[in-house]
Structures are given as structure tokens and as C-alpha cells.
Image (cartoon, grey):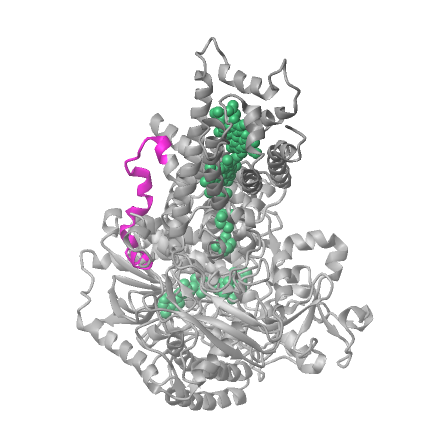
């Protein structure tokens, strides 16, 4: 099988414009004849739902949340990038494009990234018009902050709740379409499979989380906007319910899964306080603007932070990377912190963190200024740790946060299954091997507001006048059968261990062997441990209750099941990629100073995997990456 | 149709949610055939609260005037006739001869009655609405942080006060026994006053009623601003002071002459 | 620490429910309240009992999914804190904690501690948006907005839609939620065009499902974002104005 990226030719800056002109369109009064199913109501799903509704398509939107507004996008804190150059500090579409490609360690598709940078401008306009209360200066104009991996201030933010405000904007636009009758909403409905007939996606099968009813929903096209899979590590900054099920089941139906091993470990999270911890809390990266990261120079220096004099402190990021200092990209910062903790310099009761210190910022600008920027983050930290960041430095440690990998999509955001699209974090995205801060919100909204609505018509145009497949078509009943079988299977296993127990165990394996740093030995071990644990899971899980009512353990059983298969794909991919790039760090491939060592000769390509029926033996297909506009250099933030 | 009419538990909102594609129901408020504006306004809870505030305010106005009137009990008689009787008489003669005797007083009275009517009706229908809004109450203990005794007993303080009011009118204005003393006599306000409060149980009733009124106003006056949307973080704390102050002044102002009778300062 | 939990268990909307008492021993006060429930659930599963159903997702106090009555207070004793951000260190060792679902006719119970808050979506649907089709927006810096206005709008926009205001309100009123959304949009220049219809429509849908506000101020105290009831006053004022304004607009056309 060949991967056709469908990237239009022409100079990079004109590709998108030309493409928009060349794709086929559906005329306005024909649009309502097309039914489009969107799964997911995050930034990507909600913005797509709203926009497709506005355009006149007949949209149905599914989410397992009780309201579209709960989608995990709500948790994004720091901000969203846009090349507005409002501050005249030399920013431009090209610079944003360049930074993103470089930040992604040259493993992303140039054309997509440039398009992303182009539409970033419209996103800010759109959000502002919707009433998103971005932070403003006293003059009444929009304020910006700088973010990791960039030397310009291009990040728009709304206090520490940018994702919330952007999602509420998209959600309100979506609800406007619901009110207009253009979008039909299904809440607390979990998509459990994609239905493919004659090689095309023709609908989805959904389980109602309250009644347990399994139903089919036909459509002309299906869009998966179901977010990332960091929860494969159990402990991550993602919301508890975030999972891989939707895209994994699509993968099992033929959609190629690209770069599963590209995961991002976020440097600024609150370290775990005990083994019962259910999730890790992120402290927005924007804190690195004013916070200085350090550890005691001397490993067995156990004095409280405030009593450690300057000369005994090691501001290791500033020392190692003078140019970017505390603002180096996430993967770099995370690994540096890991090295410190591994070398015994970890701080805090469990010695599992490094300090993030605001003393100098407070000295420089005063409590008020700092409070103005970070008040809610400081409050959050205080609630969780009972410590006051104004007095004592924060303790932080890296945690799984974002997954660059996902369903492979072409320039039109269509997966390898015709009629099946994937947007937002769910696709393998424009971030290459590492995502820069404040660019996921940008990508989710770019896909949903601007890209998908312009490209989807090109596919639909072929099916004008064709009705959707009737729900009683055998294709649907067959899948419904499989889904119900799966669900009942979980209930009937009646083993001795809870689903969460298995999830935790899986998480530990993944964190140890497929986390911040990976080695062939470790990955091999993981690839033997995971299947063993998976077997146990299948035979020894215990799911109480019944299918016919809200049953949260039952929901999790299915999600953890898919995590087990995904985990193997991740390890296979990590093992295959004999290089270190971005979030993927192979101990065998590093410089003497322990920096990542890329191998552009052999690995400047996307590794997409096809389902074979055996999670540990997927088939590989490659998409070679050409770089015509940025030349590949070793990332240096020194 | 309100969800509470078709299914008491309000259940099945989600089912409606499932069929949101025919969501015309929601913004139909724009195109639905509307009753005349004042009716429309009064139908809404916020409108009712607004009316409550206005009527409450009017009644407060009356109460203050009335209270001042009662304080005339302390003024020396005007050639033999108690000052307050003169005042009562003057009230009846208000604007005569332009208006025939009593008529202007009746205009005032009607106004007052209307205000009471609105206030009470709004109070009633809001109470019903709020009952409906929580058919299944909390089974465990509920602990309030901000809602105080006054705010939670408004309807009770109100209703009881209403009952008192009828007694009060029977006592002073209509002269109906046993509410009114045997020696009741129309127009002889001063005498009636002394008579009434030489009956300890009645005196007690009045004092209790005035305390209730005070409590009612303690929340009412503060709440009034909120309902009318007169609000400014800068003077919000003054609303609290005003409410506390005024409610105390009013109930005291009423109670003082009563006590004066009890302690024989007035006879 | 050890605690005694009294949790409301109810199989579904149509079956009777009641309190069930659980002894939860050896938990650390570093734990969040929900992690404590996780542990209890884990133990229940191991005993073959059905775990307690409760809603939650982000566990960062931002998604608004979580929320239960804890000792008769929505989101528990710590002010300005969502249930998921509440930590066990706020409770005394050996304490008894009563846990109940939100109670309001507008929030029909689904199971145990889970209720259905879609009525909130209906309120938003009625006008909680600014009508601007994708692509039709002018440059973001075209309309400067005074910082104070933007900040106040944000204070209102911070609402996470958890429903604690309704749960805490003695009248089961949703005025704080609705006022927060209305004020957020009505304060901004972009929101002016639809200001009066928005206010009228959202209030009327709100009153279909919920009680009326008699200014108890309880909601403000329960709100994890400490949204001020000043916004309710703002909404009341706008509602009255809307009643006139909309008429006038209509009579002009
Ligand atoms: C703590 C945190 C902070 C972040 N901060 C930033 C930041 O500052 N800047 C930035 O740019 N990015 C940030 N990110 C990343 C960014 O928030 C996410 O990548 C982005 O929001 C993903 O949006 P999405 O729409 O693709 O998916 P999501 O928002 O995760 O939405 C997924 C949706 O899919 C639905 N769904 C999933 N599976 C199914 C199924 N099987 N059936 C039905 N529905 C399903 C869910 O209900 C949900 O509605 C942050 C992430 C985290 C975790
Ligand atoms: C201790 C408290 C009070 C005392 C001693 C008192 C005394 C009186 C007296 C003497 C009259 C007769 C006046 C007349 O006949 O000309 C009267 C009438 C009346 N009072 Fe009171 N009053 C008290 C409290 C109140 C309160 C709190 C209210 C309501 C807010 C009230 C409402 C009335 C009304 C409506 C009338 C009839 C006035 C009229 O003739 O139209 N009173 N009161
Ligand atoms: C006659 C019987 C009365 C009843 C049944 C009654 C009942 C009520 C009720 C239920 C409320 C609503 C509580 C709230 O919204 O905060 C209220 C508010 C109020 N009442 Fe009364 N009341 C009565 C008499 C009075 C009197 C005599 C006064 C003044 C002297 C008064 C003044 C007010 C005020 C100012 C408010 C506040 C209105 C608002 O919050 O908008 N009431 N009353
Ligand atoms: S106003 Fe506060 S309490 Fe009410 S829903 Fe919003 S956040 Fe929750
Ligand atoms: S508690 Fe209820 S009465 Fe009003 S002020 Fe809050 S809504
Ligand atoms: S779980 Fe998201 S707010 Fe509590």
C-alpha cells in the first residue's frame, strides 16, 4: 500500500491557496444532502461541527462527555500561537512555520505546517469575534507572551485558561448550530467502531453510556476528533477519560497509525505525591517565562530551598542552554530534569522533582505582576501541594502530556480509509516528533475551523444524490454484533482484578521502557511483558454491574483493552526508529553531552503502521519527508 | 411546555437533548405569540422579583410614613384633642375640598392594597416555582454559608405578617372585636391606641410582628437592590448597612410608642 | 487517616435510593477527595460490589464534570474549590462525611452521584453565543477592549458549568450560571448586537428548568470559580431593559 500525501505542488506559500481553488466544492443547497458524523467535541470536533453546520451540512456529533464543553481541550492552560506579529518583534508566518518544523525535530510535513501557520491568523480573529476574552494590555489591544521553543512573543492567552475559553467559544458556536437544527448532538454516547463498506467509511457504531444500547449511525463521511492517547501511561496530564479507542478501532478497520512512539513528556508538572495518584497536574509551560529551574549543586544537600544560597544552586537549563535558558523546547527541558533527578539531585519528599523558582521574578516585578499572570496556576498548585509558590519554589517533574502520533492523514486530513477523516490531536498532526507549546490548540482549531471544511467537499462531491447506507444493512448489524460481543465479554470474564489495576501496571511498563528515554533492551522487555499482562487482563479482569445502565468500569474496560494493543504498537515503532528525535529518545543514539542524535539518512520519514490482526506485528508503510524550505540541522538551543 | 409540566422529575431532558435537531423549541421565545408586555414581564420570575422589589419599596415608604405618624403619640394635645387624632382626621380630609372627604385617602389605600396584592401574589407564585425546582430535596443535612435566617424565612415572616396585618386593621381601622378593644371608637386614635396596648397579649403580638418585619426587611432591603439590578461593587457594602440600619429603625420606630404605653409613659 | 463515608446509592432514576455507609481506612491526606473515592471503588470491586458512580474528568477543576454535595455543601467545605481539587487534608481523621448528588428537578439523577446537566446546554443553546460564521471575523485588534472590561468579562466567562450554584441554591435557581454566561457576552463589544434577545431567551429557558433567585448568595459561595452574584444583578437589569428594548426594536421594523 502506498501513502499519498496529496500535497499540492507550487511554492510552499501558495500551496494552500491553490489547493483551496483546485478542490471540488459542493454547492450550498446540495450540502444539506450530505450527512457528516463527527466524533469528539473538543476544539477540533466542536469547531468542525460548528463550521460544517454553518456551511449547511447535516451534521451529527457524538461525545462520551455529558456536554460538549467538557472535552479535554478545556484543560489547556498556557495559550495559542499565531503569527500576528502584533508586537513587531520580527514574527511572520514563515517564522512560525520554521519554528514549528524545527521544534518538531524535522519529522513533520512541511506543507501542513505552513498551512497551519497561515490559518493561525484567522483563528485569533475568529475566537476574538466569538467573545473569547483573551488577555489585553491597558491600551485595549491583545497581549502576548513567549513560549518554549520560540524567541518571539506570539502566544495569545486568557489568564491560565486559554483552552477553556477557546473551547467555550467553539462550543457556543456549535450550540448555535444545534439550535439552528444543523447539528444533532449525542452526549454520553461512546463511538465503539467505524463501519467500512466497499473500502469506504459509511458510519459508526455507538454505545449509549446510560442505557447501554448499541446503535448504528450511517453517514457520507466520518470525522474522528477524539484527542490523544497519553493515558496509555496511566499517569498523565490528560483527563481521566481521554483514550485511544476511537482511533484504535478505526486503525483496526484499516486506517494507518503514524508514529505511535512520538509522545511528549511535559517538563512542568506537579510530581506525584503517593502511589494512589490518579493523574498528574500540569503547570502551564508559560511559568517558564518567569520561573527559574534549579536543583542543589550537591546531591545530598537536604536544606529547604530558601536556605540554599545562590552559589550552591545549579540553574541547569540556563547553564546548558544559554541562548534559550529556561525556554528550551519541552523534550530538551524534560530530559535535562530527568538527568538531574536520576543523578540523585531530586528535591521534595520523594526526591522526584526539581525547583521552579519565582523569587527573582517577584523581586523584579513584584507580587502583583506575577499574580496577574499566574494567579490561578499558583492557586492550583497551592490547593494540591498545600505550599505557597510566592514563598517556596514550586516542585516540578516531567509527565506524559501529548501524543504527536495518531492516525495518518493526507493533506486533506483524510485517513487511509476513504471517507474517514481525523483532526486535532487524534491525527499524526503537524508537530513531527515534538510539539511546541501553544500549538495544539492552534492545530485543533485550524483543522476544525478552516482546513477540513475546505477539503471535505472534494471527497463528498462524488456521492451527490447517493443516500446514506440504511441502518439495517448487514455491514452495520455485523459490526453491532462484534461490539456487543466485546462488551458482554468484559462483563462475563468475572476475574479477580479491577480494570484500573491492569491499567496502572501497563502504565508502569510504558513509563519505564517507552517513556522519556528508550533502549532496545527495555523495549524488548516491554514487548514481552505487555502481551503477558494483556493475557492476564483478558482472563482475570473483573467488571461488576450490567451493560444496561451507566457502568463506568465497563467503559474503562474497553479503553484499557485498546491501550494494551496500542502500547505494543508504540514499542514496535520506538524499536524500529533507530534514532533520537524530539520526544523519542533512544539511549543508543545520543551525543557525548547526552543530546539527541537524529539520523536523517534513514529516518526522515513517517512510519505508518497497518493492522495485521496481531498488535505486535503491524505492517510498516513509509511516507518520505521532503524538506525544501528549511534545511535540516541539529536542533541547537545553546 | 415546561419540562416540569410533562414530567415531574424533570427527567428525560437528555432525551429531548437527543433530538435537539428540532431545537426550534428553544429560541421559539422570539417568534412565539406574546402577551402584552407588562403581562409577559410579570410572567417571568425576574419580572416578579422586580415587582416585589417595587411593591416592597412602596410598602416600606408607607410603613415609614405610618411609623412617623405613630410617633405623634408623643406630641402634646392640640386644644384638647390628641395630636395624632388631628393627624388621623387630617389624613381623611386630605386635599378636601378639591377631593370629596375620604376620597384621596382611598386613592392612597387602593394603591397600597394593590402593592400588597402584587407583593403577596409574586411571593406565592415564586414559592411554588421554587418548590417545583427541587422536588427531591437533600436527604442529608444541608449547611449554608451565606444564606441567613432572614433570607430563608422571607415567606414565613411575610405570611405571618400578613395575618397580623388583618388583625391590625380589625383592631384599629375596622374596630372589629375581639381584635379591637371594647372601648374602640372610630377616629379616636389616641384612645384606641392606649386601649389596645393595655391588653398584654395584643401588645406582645404587635411586638413580635414588628420583630418579624425587621427580619423581613433585613434581607428584603438588601435583596431589593439585587433584584432591581442596582448594583455596584463600590457601594455594595453600603447596601448591607442600609438594610440593617433601616430595618432596625423601622421596627424600633413602631415599637417605641407601644412600649411607652406599656410603661405608662403614655396614658 | 480513617474516615466513615455515607454515600447516596441509587441504581437509576426510577428506583429508590438511600445512604450506604462505608468505612474507608488507611488513606493519606495528600489524596484528593476523588482519589479517596477511587480507592473505595477499587476495594468495592475487589469485594465484587458495584463501585460508586460519580462524574469526573480533568481533575484540575476546569472541566466542570465533577461535583457532589459533601456534608451538605456543594463541592465541599473549601471555598472556591471544585470537588476534584478538594484534598483529604481538609478533613479530620475519623470524620464522617456525607456525600449526596446535586438535587434539582432540572438535574435528573442518572445513577448514584451522577446527574444529567444537559439543561445547561439548553440555556446556552438559547443564545449563549455570538453569531459569527467562521471566516467572517474582522482582525482581532480592530476593536480595542478596555482591559478592565476584558477582565470582568473573563471573571464571568470563568464558569465551568458544574452546576454547584443550582445545587447550593435553596431555590434550585440557575441564575448564577446564566448570569455568568450572559454577562460574559453582554459586556463585550462583540456581544452587543444580540444583547437583548440573548438575555431574554436565555432567561426564559433557564426559568423553564430551574427555580427563581431570591438572592441568598449561596451560589457564589459554592462556585468553584467564586463568580460574583453581582453578575446576577447585571442580568436582572439587562432583562428588564431587554423587555423594553426588544419591543422598541420590533416596533421600529
Ligand atoms: C493539561 C494540558 C494542558 C495543555 N495546554 C496546552 C496549551 O497551553 N496550548 C496548546 O496548544 N495545547 C495544550 N494542550 C494540548 C491540547 O489541549 C490538546 O492537544 C487539544 O486540546 C486536543 O484537542 P482535541 O479536540 O483534538 O481533542 P480533545 O479536546 O481531547 O477532545 C476529544 C473529544 O473526543 C471525544 N471522544 C473521544 N473518544 C470518543 C469516543 N470513542 N466516542 C465518543 N467521543 C469520543 C471526547 O468526548 C472529547 O469530546 C494541553 C493539554 C493538556 C493535557
Ligand atoms: C406597632 C405597630 C403599629 C401600630 C401601633 C399601628 C397603629 C395604627 C393605627 C393607630 C392605625 C389607625 C390610623 C387611623 O385609623 O387613622 C393604623 C392603621 C393602619 N396601619 Fe398600622 N400600626 C402599626 C404597624 C403597622 C405596619 C407595620 C403596617 C404595614 C406596613 C401597618 C399598616 C396599617 C394600615 C394599612 C392601616 C390603615 C390605614 C388606613 O386607614 O388606610 N401598621 N395603624
Ligand atoms: C404582606 C405579606 C408579605 C409577604 C407574604 C411577603 C413576602 C415576601 C417574599 C416571599 C419576598 C421574597 C424574598 C426575596 O425575594 O428576597 C419578599 C421580599 C420583600 N418584601 Fe415582603 N412580604 C410581605 C410584606 C412585606 C412588607 C410589609 C414589606 C415592607 C414593609 C415587605 C418588603 C419586602 C421587600 C423590600 C422585599 C425584597 C424584594 C426583592 O428582593 O426584590 N414585604 N417579601
Ligand atoms: S457559576 Fe460557578 S457554580 Fe455555577 S456552574 Fe458556573 S462554575 Fe459552577
Ligand atoms: S443561591 Fe440562589 S437565590 Fe439567587 S443568589 Fe444564588 S441563585
Ligand atoms: S473533574 Fe474536571 S472540574 Fe473536577
Total residue callouts:
0
Residue segment shown in magenta: B13-40
Question: Is A479 placed left or right of A413 in the picture?
Answer: left
Of residues A389 and B244, the one drawn nearer to the viewer in this rendering:
B244
Q: Where is residue B257 in the image (x, y as percent from the top left)?
A: 63, 31
Residue A52 drawn above or below residue A569? above
Instruction: Indicate yes or no whether the magenta region holds residue C33.
Output: no
Occupied quadrant, residue A484: bottom left
Instruction: Indicate yes or no whether the magenta region holds residue B28.
Output: yes
Q: Main secondary structure of the magenta part?
A: helix
The quarter of the picture where the N terminus of chain C appears is: bottom right
Q: Position of residue A536 (x, y in %)?
A: 41, 90
Residue A490 drawn above or below residue C207? below
Q: Residue at x 53, y 84 (%)?
A: A513
Of residues B124 and B77, the one drawn nearer to the viewer in this rendering:
B77
Q: Where is residue B72 in the image (x, y as percent from the top left)?
A: 62, 24
Residue at the far front in the pictured view: B182
Q: Is residue B1 visible?
A: yes
Q: Is residue C225 visible?
A: no
Residue C250 drawn above or below residue B227? above
Residue at the far top in the pictured view: B97
Of residues A192 and C56, the one drawn nearer to the viewer in this rendering:
C56
Q: Where is residue A638 in the image (x, y as percent from the top left)?
A: 68, 68
Question: Is A425 placed left or right of C158 in the picture?
Answer: left
The quarter of the picture where the C terminus of chain C appears is: top left
Amino acid at each position: 500500500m502506498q501513502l499519498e500525501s496529496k500535497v499540492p505542488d507550487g511554492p510552499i506559500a501558495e500551496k494552500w491557496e491553490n489547493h483551496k481553488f483546485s478542490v471540488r466544492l459542493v454547492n450550498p443547497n446540495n450540502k444539506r444532502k450530505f450527512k457528516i458524523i463527527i466524533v469528539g467535541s473538543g476544539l477540533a470536533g466542536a469547531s468542525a461541527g460548528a463550521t460544517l453546520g454553518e456551511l449547511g451540512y447535516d451534521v451529527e456529533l457524538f461525545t462520551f462527555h455529558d456536554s460538549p464543553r467538557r472535552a479535554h481541550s478545556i484543560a489547556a492552560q498556557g495559550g495559542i500561537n499565531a503569527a500576528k506579529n502584533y508586537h513587531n518583534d520580527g514574527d511572520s508566518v514563515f517564522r512560525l512555520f520554521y519554528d514549528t518544523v524545527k521544534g518538531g525535530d524535522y519529522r513533520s510535513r512541511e506543507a501542513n505546517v505552513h498551512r497551519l501557520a497561515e490559518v493561525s491568523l484567522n483563528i485569533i480573529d475568529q475566537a476574538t469575534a466569538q467573545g473569547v476574552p483573551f488577555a489585553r494590555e491597558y491600551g485595549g489591544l491583545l497581549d502576548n507572551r513567549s513560549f518554549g521553543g520560540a524567541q518571539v512573543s506570539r502566544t495569545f492567552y486568557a489568564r491560565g485558561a486559554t483552552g477553556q475559553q477557546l473551547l467555550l467559544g467553539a462550543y457556543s458556536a456549535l450550540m448555535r448550530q444545534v439550535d439552528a437544527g444543523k447539528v444533532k448532538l449525542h452526549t454520553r454516547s461512546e463511538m465503539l467502531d467505524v463501519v467500512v463498506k466497499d473500502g469506504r467509511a459509511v458510519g459508526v457504531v455507538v454505545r449509549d453510556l446510560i442505557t447501554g444500547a448499541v446503535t448504528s449511525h450511517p453517514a457520507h463521511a466520518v470525522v474522528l476528533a477524539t484527542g490523544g492517547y497519553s493515558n496509555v501511561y496511566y499517569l498523565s496530564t490528560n483527563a481521566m477519560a481521554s483514550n485511544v479507542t476511537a482511533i484504535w478501532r478505526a486503525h483496526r478497520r484499516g486506517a494507518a497509525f503514524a508514529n505511535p512512539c512520538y509522545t511528549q513528556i511535559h517538563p512542568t508538572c506537579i510530581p506525584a505525591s503517593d502511589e494512589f495518584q490518579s493523574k498528574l497536574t500540569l503547570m502551564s509551560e508559560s511559568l517558564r517565562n518567569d520561573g527559574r529551574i534549579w536543583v542543589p549543586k550537591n546531591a545530598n544537600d537536604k536544606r529547604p530551598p530558601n536556605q540554599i544560597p545562590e552559589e550552591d544552586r545549579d540553574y541547569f537549563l540556563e547553564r546548558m542552554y544559554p541562548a534559550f535558558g529556561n525556554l528550551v523546547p519541552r523534550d530538551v527541558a524534560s530530559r535535562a530534569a530527568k538527568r538531574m533527578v536520576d543523578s540523585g539531585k531530586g528535591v521534595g519528599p520523594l526526591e522526584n522533582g526539581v525547583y521552579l523558582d519565582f523569587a527573582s521574578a517577584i523581586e523584579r516585578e513584584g507580587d502583583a505582576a506575577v499574580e496577574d499572570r499566574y494567579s490561578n496556576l499558583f492557586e492550583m498548585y497551592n490547593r494540591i501541594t498545600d505550599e505557597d509558590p510566592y514563598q517556596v519554589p514550586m516542585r516540578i517533574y516531567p509527565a506524559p502530556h501529548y501524543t504527536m502520533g495518531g492516525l495518518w492523514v493526507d493533506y486533506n486530513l483524510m485517513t487511509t480509509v476513504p471517507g474517514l477523516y481525523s483532526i486535532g490531536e487524534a491525527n499524526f498532526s503537524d508537530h513531527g516528533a515534538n510539539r511546541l507549546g501553544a500549538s495544539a490548540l492552534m492545530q485543533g482549531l485550524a483543522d476544525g475551523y478552516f482546513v477540513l471544511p475546505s477539503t471535505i467537499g472534494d471527497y463528498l462531491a462524488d456521492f451527490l444524490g447517493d443516500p446514506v447506507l440504511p441502518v439495517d444493512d448487514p455491514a452495520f448489524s455485523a459490526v453491532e454484533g462484534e461490539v456487543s460481543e466485546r462488551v458482554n465479554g468484559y462483563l462475563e470474564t468475572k476475574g479477580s482484578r479491577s480494570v484500573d489495576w491492569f491499567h496502572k501496571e501497563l502504565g508502569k511498563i510504558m513509563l519505564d521502557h517507552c517513556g522519556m528515554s528508550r533502549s532496545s533492551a527495555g523495549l524488548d522487555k516491554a514487548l514481552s511483558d505487555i502481551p503477558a499482562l494483556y493475557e492476564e487482563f483478558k482472563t482475570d479482569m473483573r467488571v461488576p454491574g450490567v451493560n444496561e445502565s451507566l457502568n463506568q468500569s465497563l467503559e474503562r474496560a474497553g479503553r484499557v483493552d485498546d491501550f494494551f494493543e496500542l502500547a505494543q504498537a508504540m514499542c514496535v515503532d520506538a524499536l524500529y526508529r533507530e534514532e533520537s528525535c524530539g520526544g523519542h529518545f533512544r539511549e543508543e543514539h545520543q551525543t557525548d553531552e547526552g543530546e539527541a542524535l537524529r539520523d536523517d539518512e534513514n529516518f526522515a520519514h513517517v512510519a505508518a503502521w497497518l493492522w495485521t490482526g496481531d498488535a505486535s506485528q503491524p505492517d510498516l508503510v513509509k511516507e518520505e519527508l521532503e524538506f525544501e524550505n528549511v534545511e535540516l540541522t541539529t536542533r541547537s538551543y545553546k | 411546555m415546561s419540562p416540569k409540566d410533562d414530567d415531574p422529575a424533570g427527567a428525560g431532558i437528555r432525551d429531548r437533548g437527543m433530538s435537539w435537531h428540532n431545537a426550534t423549541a428553544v429560541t421559539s421565545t422570539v417568534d412565539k405569540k406574546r402577551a402584552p408586555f407588562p403581562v409577559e414581564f410579570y410572567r417571568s420570575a425576574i419580572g416578579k422579583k422586580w415587582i416585589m422589589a417595587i411593591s416592597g419599596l412602596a410598602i416600606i415608604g408607607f410603613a415609614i410614613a405610618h411609623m412617623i405618624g405613630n410617633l405623634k403619640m408623643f406630641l402634646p394635645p392640640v386644644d384638647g384633642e390628641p395630636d395624632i387624632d388631628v393627624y388621623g382626621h387630617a389624613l381623611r380630609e386630605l386635599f378636601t375640598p378639591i377631593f370629596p372627604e375620604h376620597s384621596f385617602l382611598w386613592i392612597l389605600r387602593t394603591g397600597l392594597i394593590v402593592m400588597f396584592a402584587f407583593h403577596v401574589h409574586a411571593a406565592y407564585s415564586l414559592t411554588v416555582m421554587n418548590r417545583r425546582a427541587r422536588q427531591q430535596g437533600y436527604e442529608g443535612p444541608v449547611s449554608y454559608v451565606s444564606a441567613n435566617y432572614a433570607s430563608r424565612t422571607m415567606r414565613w415572616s411575610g405570611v405571618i405578617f400578613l395575618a397580623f396585618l388583618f388583625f391590625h386593621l380589625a383592631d384599629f381601622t375596622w374596630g372589629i372585636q375581639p381584635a379591637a378593644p371594647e372601648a374602640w371608637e372610630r377616629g379616636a386614635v389616641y384612645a384606641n391606641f392606649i386601649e389596645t396596648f393595655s391588653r398584654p397579649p395584643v401588645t406582645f403580638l404587635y411586638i413580635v410582628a414588628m420583630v418579624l418585619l425587621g427580619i423581613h426587611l433585613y434581607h428584603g432591603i438588601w435583596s431589593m437592590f439585587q433584584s432591581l439590578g442596582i448594583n455596584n461593587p463600590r457601594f455594595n457594602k453600603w447596601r448591607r448597612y442600609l438594610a440593617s440600619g433601616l430595618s432596625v429603625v423601622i421596627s424600633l420606630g413602631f415599637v417605641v410608642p407601644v412600649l411607652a404605653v406599656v410603661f405608662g409613659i403614655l396614658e | 487517616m480513617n474516615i466513615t463515608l455515607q454515600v447516596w446509592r441509587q441504581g437509576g432514576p426510577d428506583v429508590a435510593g438511600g445512604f450506604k455507609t462505608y468505612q474507608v481506612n488507611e488513606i493519606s491526606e495528600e489524596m484528593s477527595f476523588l482519589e479517596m473515592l477511587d480507592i473505595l471503588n477499587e476495594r468495592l470491586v475487589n469485594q465484587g460490589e458495584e463501585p460508586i458512580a460519580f462524574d469526573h474528568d480533568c481533575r484540575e477543576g476546569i472541566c466542570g464534570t465533577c461535583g457532589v454535595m459533601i456534608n451538605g455543601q456543594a463541592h465541599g467545605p473549601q471555598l472556591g474549590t471544585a470537588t476534584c481539587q478538594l484534598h483529604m487534608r481538609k478533613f479530620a481523621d475519623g470524620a464522617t462525611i456525607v456525600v449526596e448528588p446535586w438535587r434539582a428537578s432540572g438535574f435528573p439523577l442518572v445513577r448514584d452521584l451522577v446527574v444529567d446537566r444537559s439543561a445547561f446546554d439548553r440555556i446556552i443553546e438559547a443564545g449563549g453565543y455570538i453569531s459569527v460564521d467562521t471566516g467572517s471575523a474582522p482582525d482581532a485588534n480592530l476593536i480595542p477592549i478596555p482591559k478592565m472590561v476584558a477582565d470582568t468579562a473573563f471573571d464571568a466567562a470563568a464558569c465551568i458549568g458544574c452546576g454547584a450554584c443550582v445545587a447550593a441554591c435553596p431555590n434550585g435557581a440557575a441564575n448564577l450560571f446564566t448570569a455568568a454566561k450572559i454577562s460574559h457576552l453582554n459586556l463585550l463589544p462583540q456581544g452587543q448586537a444580540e444583547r437583548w434577545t440573548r438575555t431574554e431567551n436565555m432567561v426564559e429557558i433557564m426559568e423553564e428548568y430551574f427555580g427563581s433567585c431570591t438572592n441568598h448568595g449561596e451560589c457564589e459561595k459554592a462556585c468553584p470559580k467564586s463568580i460574583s452574584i453581582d453578575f446576577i444583578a447585571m442580568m436582572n437589569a439587562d432583562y428588564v431593559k431587554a423587555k423594553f428594548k426588544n419591543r422598541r426594536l420590533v416596533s421600529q421594523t
